[in-house]
Amino acid sequence: MEHDLSEEDIEKLSHLCRIACTPEEKEKLRANLSKILGYVDQLKEIDTTGVPPCNSVLEGMTNPLREDESCDTMSREVFLANAPAHVGGMIRVPPVIKF
Amino acid sequence: MHTAKETQRRFQDGEISAQDIIKVCLERIEQQDGKVGAFLSLAKERAYKRAVELDKKRKEGKPLGKLAGVPIAIKDNIHIEGELTTCASKFLTNYRAPFSATVVESLEKEDALIVGKTNLDEFAMGSSTETSAFKLTKNPWDLACTPGGSSGGSAAAVAARFVPIAFGSDTGGSIRQPASLTGVVGFKPSYGRVSRYGLVAFGSSLDQIGPFATRVEDVALTMNVVAHHCHKDSTSVTKAPEDYAALLGSPFRGCKIGVPWNFMADLAGDAKDNFLASLEILKKLHCEIVDVDLEILKTSIAVYYILATAEASTNLARFDGIRYGARSLKAKTLDEVYDLSKQEGFGPEVKNRILLGTYVLSSGYQDAYYRHAQKVRTLIIRQFAEAFKQCTAIAMPVSPFPAFPLGSIQDPLQMYLQDIYTIAANLAGLPAISVPSGFNQEGKPWGLQLLGPQLQDGNVLHIAHAFEQVTQYSHQLPPLFAS
């Protein structure tokens, strides 16, 4: 059982998650996703009226926050060691704004 | 090859030096891993440096750690400071970890000697280790077959006796399924029991780091080292851990074990025969087998592939080519940095899951898919809670199939169905183990799965240990690696 996604659907998704795809990749993704969505459609049969969504597996889990104190977690040198391009201690990227 | 417990004792008693342990270990890997492909990289310098320090420590009469001298392998999605963490992805080919995972710090504090990083499915997404961008890992029991996945490298490294302990991660079965397919013990702790700090996140509400070993005793020893609260992981439980190794020392007197027959109606053939044989052994251990209702688990895979992909699409958004990772050389605009780096860096299965996750979270679909799946997850948790009112642990097979040939499963959905019995433990955050339970006619291993209520990790280990003591399947070595 398939849940047919269109080429346009894949275009939109590819744009949302910022992954460029060739036409062949798009077609493969369309076919795979349609099949998987067809499979997960079985969940429509399950009645979840009045059932709360599971936000945490652990009972009574809170969101523990640390003290709002600034601390150094990583030196600039260590951070930049993995940077694809950097200049003057900053990450270098192509222009963001077109003039 | 010696177990972790034996290795630690031999080192502590002065029978062998840490440097010799590492020398023998690395030699064996160098000679034999060509056939298996378990390792992506070796941390030789780090291992030798620590071995020298450890030998000095022993000579000076200083107290030695619980895992002193034990060589350990780590799945390559867990950080070791200064070493590469690739997640088996082209995107992270040259990424060097700027910090160590809490698990790694805990292990090294107890004098374990980490020797290298193991292969996995890319970003831990898979059940066969075949989606690794770098190499295939073979099953030591049959080199034409996969070791399972996603922690296939770690499973194979232990099965081939390269190391007595290896670490993996389990989001939908990625420790238990490869353990079952390679005839070793694999344990997924309760959610929150072991820190996820330093594990590259895939599905944050599902992921857990856990150990592979050839004995349940070694798993317990390892849990005593890594199962503790971590303030850097906000999902880490504060409840004090049990002394797992001590628990195994007490005699096992049997307990009620639930079997969800209504969920497993499709179980058939050799897998069913092996499972029934395992139940007979549990009965001989004074266990009472009771039928429990877990029919809702038939929805496990559907729920998982909505929630896990949604979480993955969020977690992998950070790989954008800006701050780290392989930035596309073709990118001329900012948008192209994102679009092309991801196109070039991610494999097809990763893209499948990111797009699927994006879809189920997108406007107009979030309620129908994501929120609905979260509600079904609540139903799954509730049904487990009901079942555990009637039993101490639940028994199931790990996998409907033994190790399958490399390349034999091309359809993503068919691959997802491998996880039918393992996924539920991740959805409900339960501790679950795979312990070797026999071999099929081709000599391929089977595993028995035992699950417990949340934070009852000790009980699960105790039952598995008792099962292992009478069957000793985990004592058998793959013929090709028996010397």
Image (cartoon, helix red, strand yellow):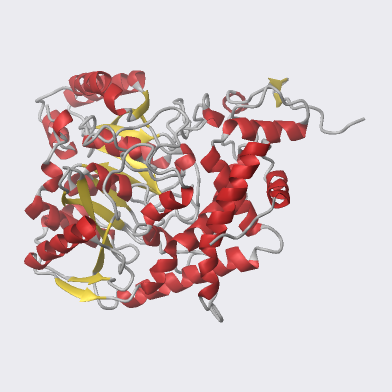
Taking the view exactly as shown, the residue that stands out farthest to the front is A1
Q: Is residue B288 left or right of B50 when viewed as pictured? A: left
Where residue B15 appears, x then y in whole percent? 9, 25
Q: Nearer the viewer, residue B187 or B245?
A: B187
Q: Check the image and report above or below for B200 versus B429.
A: above
Residue B91 visible at all: yes
Residue B106 visible at all: no
Where residue B305 appears, x then y in whole percent? 50, 56
Quadrant of the image containing the C terminus of chain B: top left
The part of the image, by quadrant, that contains residue B339 is: top right
Q: Nearer the viewer, residue B454 or B36?
A: B36
What is the count of numbered marks?
Answer: 0
Q: Nearer the viewer, residue B59 or B93?
A: B93
Where residue B421 appears, x then y in whole percent? 34, 59
Q: At x 47% / y 35%, what residue is drawn?
A: B87
Q: Check the image and report above or below for A76 versus A8.
A: above
Q: Is residue A67 left or right of B155 when viewed as pictured? A: right
Quadrant of the image containing the N terminus of chain B: top left
The part of the image, by quadrant, that contains residue B334 is: top right
Where residue B478 appears, x then y in whole percent? 16, 35
